[in-house]
Structure formats: structure tokens, C-alpha cells
Image (tube, rainbow, N blue to C red):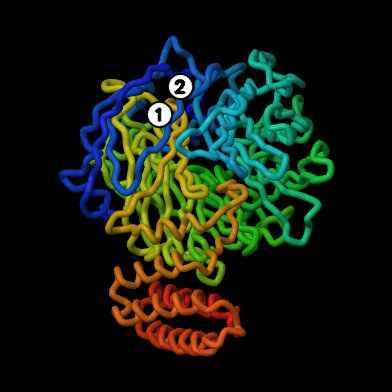
Amino acid sequence: MRLLLNQLIRSTRWLGLAVLLTIVVARGDAQQHSGAASPVDPRVGLKAGLRDAGQAARGMELVASLPKPEGFFDPKAPAGDAVPPERDSAAAVDDPDQAAVSLLRARPPAQAPFLLSFANSDLAFQRDNLWLGNYHGLNAYNIENVRKPRLEVSVVCPGGQGDVSVYGNLLFMSVEQRLGRVDCGTEGVAAPVSTERFRGIRIFDISNLGKPKQIAAVQTCRGSHTHTLVTDPRDKTNLYVYASGTGFARSSAELAECSALPPNEDPNTAFFSIDVIQVPLAAPQSARVVNRPRIFADAKTGAVAGLNRGGNQGPGTQTSSETNQCHDITAFSEIGLAAGACAGNGLLLDISDPAHPVRIDEVSDRNFAYWHSATFNADGSKVIFTDEWGGGTRPRCRATDRPTWGADAIFDIVDRKLRFASYYKMPAPQTEQENCVAHNGSLIPVPGRDIMVQAWYQGGVSVFDFTDSARPIEIAFFDRGPVDPARLVIGGYWSTYWYNGAIYGSEIIRGLDIFRLIPTEHLSRNEIDAANEVHLDALNVQTQRRITWPATAVVARAYLDQLGRTHAIPPERTTAVTSTLARIDHVGSRRDRHAATAVAQADALTAQLEQDARATSAQDRARLRSLAALIESRAARLR
């Protein structure tokens, strides 16, 4: 959710009423990526309501739901204000945030009201704790029992957007709005220039979870709308933060190194760069900006404004945004790459030197208004970019909206270049009263498949498989009816992320939701259990890590289910795999008289699986080889 939100609505608020929910569970075939839902899609026509909205679900179940705690809602106006109507027909395709940014750059307001005072934003996880950002501060929950989460601590610290990340005993928080204060005060800052104003990255010490303590506040010229933690495998003493600011640039009178002038008037403009912050882990209070790389520069001339200049892209296309900022950057340090969703372009960055990221490829798309976020698949061979058409404040999933607008674009990464494969958009049409567009999601670590869970604001939650990058398909969903039956009110899911066996949803107005996946014809019990074999000590979704699966029987069964689903393995091979694993497990050690026989059986089977792999599709070839490697790993102790 970008800057325009703060000019569109006054706040999101909560009414603390416990009401029984209407639940509809759907069954049937998954919807394809064409954007057309079946006539019986249960997401269509759900009852509206703040706390009693109708629900529809397939392949997942809601297991817990918590409203916002006191101090993070306004009980006098539970559902917030309606979004003003769009100015004209052109606004339907214009990127509204770019217009807002241009206006602010020309004439920043003396003091913009804090219009999203209580909106929930992004999520971060560490051990049994969940951190939920909010425009008014943050809340921490204990999630040891996913069916009974409990609030641990609330921190009032306004400033928007409130995106959070955790690393060890440190918590990082993005602040972009003009009313943010260094001291976390709620009174705002009225003066146009003030040393009390804070826009940038806050750093908290959370070694005492019950009493987070701010230990650093790194000021930046455009504030921090989002941020990304980046590690350097060769440097264990420092952590890096990529801060992405999307707001106007403050004046040099407030922060000396800032310039709000365009690049043709000042080559040191605060636009057309990101901020790289170095955090010495032994002294995080000394964190500072160490670089403002010009990752949008023209590769030949060096001109800092070298990518998409924004504007009309021709008949039947989106009006795109100028690439003078990144909205989100996702780092995958283990492969030395980052993907930047940067307004008018999607970028691929070399981050082998985290302090000096280098652009190695860029793409544009005439169907995209605003490149918003990015997600790699598990091995870094694909990346999904999202388009936040309408800035997250508008209904962009109606039956009349194009399935390629406000959608995901899936790219394969080939020789460190981005190659377009397809689009995906949540397929159930939504109403005029539901803001809906592609937003934040994460991978679900099912071995042998690329699966993502994604938030679509009031479009709900969509789980889709993009193993075949050219043919993504929805396999599960959850949705509620509109917040309000007659007005467009900003609500729905900001982020939905998988973490250690559950899916967590940050609901802008309603609070925190927790889901479990349930088996369907598209996702087996074995596949769900195999994903649950992955245990993370922490999760910051914009900081991706390589996923590995243990060589367990349940992971093997997940591969077998997938190979059976695509008819890539004969029944006798499935039987052979099951019996071979059982024999290996039955043998106690290499000294056992049956060890040699078990090893020979495993070797013969892996050779047969390799032969099968040569005669099948690329996806099934990878599964067969992973299955063979798992069997070899299980047999290794007997050699």
C-alpha cells in the first residue's frame, strides 16, 4: 500500500463484536489463470460485514482469528471512511501513487493528516513470535499454539507504513510519513522543517520481548516505505538494509544530503536511488547509510533516470509509473541475486557485494501500472512480480477488469536474465465495494512444486501452483464478503505468509487470521506434511533463503503423489520405492547382515528412477531425481 492511501482514507477502525460467521466450503476443480471464475465459485455474492461477513474456502481452513488490540482501532467508527470516487475515466488506468508523488514533489503539504492511523501492514516471524506492523506501531504475538495465539506486547509508534523485519535481537521498522517522530510520539510534527521528524528505518532491541527499546533511527531523504535485510556470506559482522522510499524528498534544511530537485537540475537528487544502510551487529546503534546506488541509471550514458519514464504506453495499455524508486526488493543472498519491483520496471540485481548492488537486467510490461513486489521460487530460477494497479485502494478484480492488469507476472531466470512466462490473477470476480489487486505473498515449501500463497486485499487469499511457469493454476483459496455492503472501504489482506506449517494473514481492518492447508485433489496430505517438515527459525519474506527438505519418508511420499498425479511413474515403481525405503529403515546399521542387500536394492532402484527421468517432462524429471537422491541419502548410513 503506497503513499496515496494516506490521502484517501482517514483510518481503518475496529468494532469489537464477536459474531458467528457464515462459512461456505467449496469443492471442485481449481480455477485457471484466465481470470474467469466458474459460475458456481462460492466467492461470488458473499454477505458483507465487518465481523459477520460470509466466508468461502477451499483447500484451507481458518483456525484462529484475533481482532486488533486496544489502542489500534477507533471504536467510534468501526469500518472507516469510504474511499472518494475516482476523478475520471482516465484514473481507471493511471497509477494514482505516481500522480500523488509528483504532486508532493512539486509542493509537499505542510502537514498531511494521518489517514491510515490503524491499518495493519506487514508480518515478520522469529521462533514462536509473530510481529505485525501497523501504521500506528506494531504488535507481537506468541504463535506456539496456532489455534490460540496470544498478544505479547504492543508498541505505539506512528509513522507509516510500519513494515517490520527481525534479525537476532534486532527489529527493523519502516517509517515514511511526515508525522513520524524520532521519539515515537503520537502528536506528529507540524513544522515543515524539524529535527523531531523521523522518516527512515527504526531499529529496536527486542532481547526483552516485553520491552522493545529503540536504539537507532536512521534518517533517509524519502523515508522508508519498505525495507529488505541483506546478509553478506563473507561478512558476518555486518547486516545491510535496503530502504525503499516512495514519498517526496525532504528538504536539505531538514536533512543536509537531500535534494528534491529533478536530476537535470541536481545530479545529487534524492530520487532515482535506494538507500543502503550498514548495521554493525556488535554496535547496531551505529547504523548508517553507506550508499545510494543509482540502480536505475542508463547503462550507456550513466544518466540516473535511465529506465521507464512513465506515462501513456499506447492504446489498450496501462499508464505506467516513472522508475525513480523501488517499492519492494527481495534478496536471495545465497545465490547473489535480488529482484526489485521498482515502479515502472522489474529489476534483477547482483548483490554479491551487498553494499553495492548492480543491475544486471530490467523488464517492463505495458500491462503493468506499478511494479510492487517480487518473490523468487525455491531455487531462484523464477521470480514473480506483482502489479499494484490502483495503489491497493481500488476495486481491480471485477468481472470487467482485465486478467493481465493488477496481476502477477511470472518470469524464468535464464543466464541471469528475466524471460517472461505468463500472468496469474486471482480468478473470482469481486465487487465495486472491494479493493482488490495483487499484493504480498510467500512460498509454501512443498517439495517438487512451486506454490505461493498471496494476499489480494478484499479479494482474499489465493494459493496457486506455478511449477509450470507458463501455466499457473489456483489450488486453494479463502475469501470474505466486503467490509461494507454499500461503500468502498479499504480492507482485506495486506500480507499472507506461510511459516512453519500455518498461513498467517495480516487483515488491514479485522486483525490477524491463521489458516491451515487441508488436502484436496490438487494438494495431498503427504505434500502438506512434507512442507511442514521445513522448520524456520525466522522469516522475513523479502529476505529469501534456500529451502532444503529432510530425507524423510513423508517427503518421498510427496514426490510419489506428484508423479502419480502426472502419470510419470508406473504403479510397480511406486511399490518398489515404498518397499525399498521400508527395508532401509528396518536395517539397523552397516554391520547388519541385511545391509548389503538393502543397499543393492536402493542402487538398482535409483538407477531405474534415473532411466525414468530421461523419458519425462522437466518437472517430473526433477522430482524423480530428487526422489533418487533421497533414497541414496537414506541408504548412505548402510554403506
Asked if residue 203 is positioned above or below residue 295 in the image, the reply reads above
- Quadrant of residue 638 in the image? bottom right
Q: Could you tell me if residue 178 is visible in this image?
A: no
Image position of 67 (left or right of 304): left
Question: What secondary structure is marked by label 2?
Answer: loop
Q: Is residue 614 above or below residue 94?
A: below
Comparing 222 with 173, the one in front is: 173
Q: Quadrant location of residue 468?
A: bottom left
The image's mark for residue 527 is none
Q: Which residue is mark 2?
A: 12
Amino acid beneath label 2:
Thr
SS of the residue at dot 1? loop
The image shows residue 141 at horizontal and vertical percentages of 56, 32
Residue marked by disc 1: 491
Q: Amino acid at mark 1?
A: Gly
Could you tell me if the residues under marks 1 and 2 are in contact, i.e. CB atoms within 8 Å? yes
